[in-house]
Amino acid sequence: MNSSATDGLTQLLIETADGLFTARYSERGLAALDFPRRSAAGSSKTKPAVSPAVQTFHRLATNALKRSLAGRPPGQLPPLDLSAGTDFQQRVWRELRNIPAGQSRSYGQIAQAIGRPKAVRAVGGACGANPVPVLVPCHRVLAANQKPGGFSGGIVWKKKLLEREGIELTGW
DNA sequence: TCAACCTGGTAGG
DNA sequence: CCTACCAGGTTGA
């Protein structure tokens, strides 16, 4: 099990049919999830001790990610450590988490749901800053009229995740 | 203070 | 359908 602790977080890899994801954990939970990158893993050869808590988080995250990538409900998620986000961002992320698989919302709907009806574009910003894509389903947030909108992880991923959940878009 | 952003709505062709 | 334009909240430099 190849792990490293660069910034105080424990970094572990998750191998999926879609490539190698990188997960980072604090002792409070999953703090970040990165899409597979082309720039090779460059994994360190050292193996810092992985706490039992983090091992549990990792097992849950791995299962949840694989199910989500298959377009299915994730099952039990690990605890999430989103403490790095601002209050506004955390409110947005919390709201995203209660969009069920297979459903979508618009940026405007999220803005209203958190009580900031005009902060539409700011919601987009918070989605882009989401440290845990896929499990915090920022891909289920579309622009008005079911148009795709953007995706910092690459619009291709957004399209892929949506179509696996059977969510239809307009304008392609 | 300022520019950037995963928006939304309106106006016009 | 498309382009142009601007109001807009929040963030990070």
Image (spheres, coloured by chain):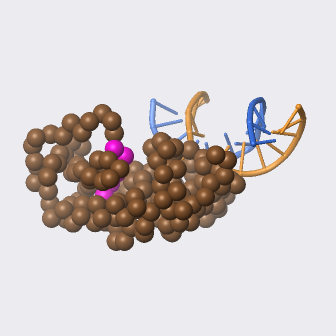
Chain colours: A brown, B orange, C blue
Measuring 40% from the left and 58% from the top, which residue is drawn there?
A: A69
Q: Quadrant of residue A106?
A: bottom right
Measuring 35% from the left and 50% from the top, which residue is drawn there?
A: A18
Residue A32 sits inside the magenta stretch: yes
Answer yes or no: is residue A11 visible: yes
Residue A38, x across and y down, in percent: 33, 36
Q: Nearer the viewer, residue A2 or C6?
A: A2
Magenta span: A30-36
Left or right? Give the position of A28 relative to A106.
left
Measuring 39% from the left and 67% from the top, which residue is drawn there?
A: A74
Left or right? Give the position of A146 relative to C10.
right
Decide whether the magenta segment is chiefly helix, strand or loop.
strand
Q: Nearer the viewer, residue A51 or A99?
A: A99
Left or right? Give the position of A171 relative to A160.
right
Residue A93, x across and y down, in percent: 48, 58
User: Compared with residue A78, is residue C11 higher up or lower down, i.e. above or below?
Assistant: above
User: Compared with residue A170, is residue A52 higher up or lower down, i.e. above or below?
Assistant: below
Measuring 39% from the left and 54% from the top, which residue is drawn there?
A: A132
